Amino acid sequence: CFIGLALGKNMATIICLRACLGLFGCIGTILVGGTFDDMFVADERAIPMALFAYVAILGTVGAPIYAGFIDQAIGWRWIEGIQGLSNVPLLIIIFLFFKETRGGVTLQKRAKSLRKDTGDERWVSKEELEAPGLKDALYNSSVKAIKMLISEPVVFFFGLWISFAWFLTFLFLSVIGITFSHF
């Protein structure tokens, strides 16, 4: 989306891509608690969670400051381009060096390794025994989620609020340079 913003030719493209960034960006905010729960024991979770909150707030406050200097020097499109291009090495690092944190996946890998080492096919994880088929997995991740979004007011309004808040944050941060440079 950031690279699309850098290359976008009209305001409709910018608004649509910023809306997508807001909608997709809110997912990380929602999942960070569960991810930290997987990564750290309860006694060691406070510092990483506080650091995440600090960095998130610092980024929201600091980004318009350094982005203003970049905008003055080389233009607002480079702000988006730099953010998009900086994600490429980050994705490579994530895929190469970060391990899966979900317990079921770890046990599944361990059972597979034990089957390979011992030749005993009895080593299976609970997830392998209860693994849904493709149809069930797609149903659970899409239809079931949409049903909850429609039928559960708390889920709907919480998702709506977070997506709207991130949409506004990304929208306002992107149009500051455009507004002040054109008007």
Image: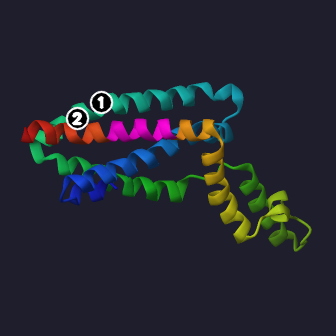
Instruction: Pick whichever, 53 or 93, lies toward us.
Output: 53
Looking at the rendered structure, the kind of residue marked 2 is: Tyr
Say which mark, if any, is on residue 62. Answer: 1
Quick check: marks 2 and 1 in contact, CB under 8 Å? Answer: yes
Element at label 1? helix
114 up-or-down from 10: above or below: below
Crowdedness near tag 2: few (<14), some (14–19) or many (≥20) residues, C-alpha within 10 Å: few
| Quadrant of the rendered image containing residue 60 | top left
Q: Indicate whether 179 appears above or below 85.
A: above
Residue 91 percent across, percent down from the top left: 45, 56
Q: How far apart are marks 2 and 1 (CA)?
A: 7 Å
Instruction: Say whether residue 139 is left or right of residue 89.
Output: right
- 124 in relation to 175, above or below: below
In percent of width and height, residue 63 lies at 29, 35
Relative to residue 25, is residue 129 depicted above or below? below
Relative depth, front residue between 64 and 153: 153
The magenta region covers 160-170
Quadrant containing the C terminus is top left
Residue 168 sits inside the magenta stretch = yes
Given the image, on which type of amino acid does mark 1 rest? Gly
- Residue matched to label 2: 66
Residue at 60%, 25% (x, y): give it. 46
Could you tell whether 61 is left or right of 151 in the image?
A: left
Q: Is residue 86 magenta?
A: no
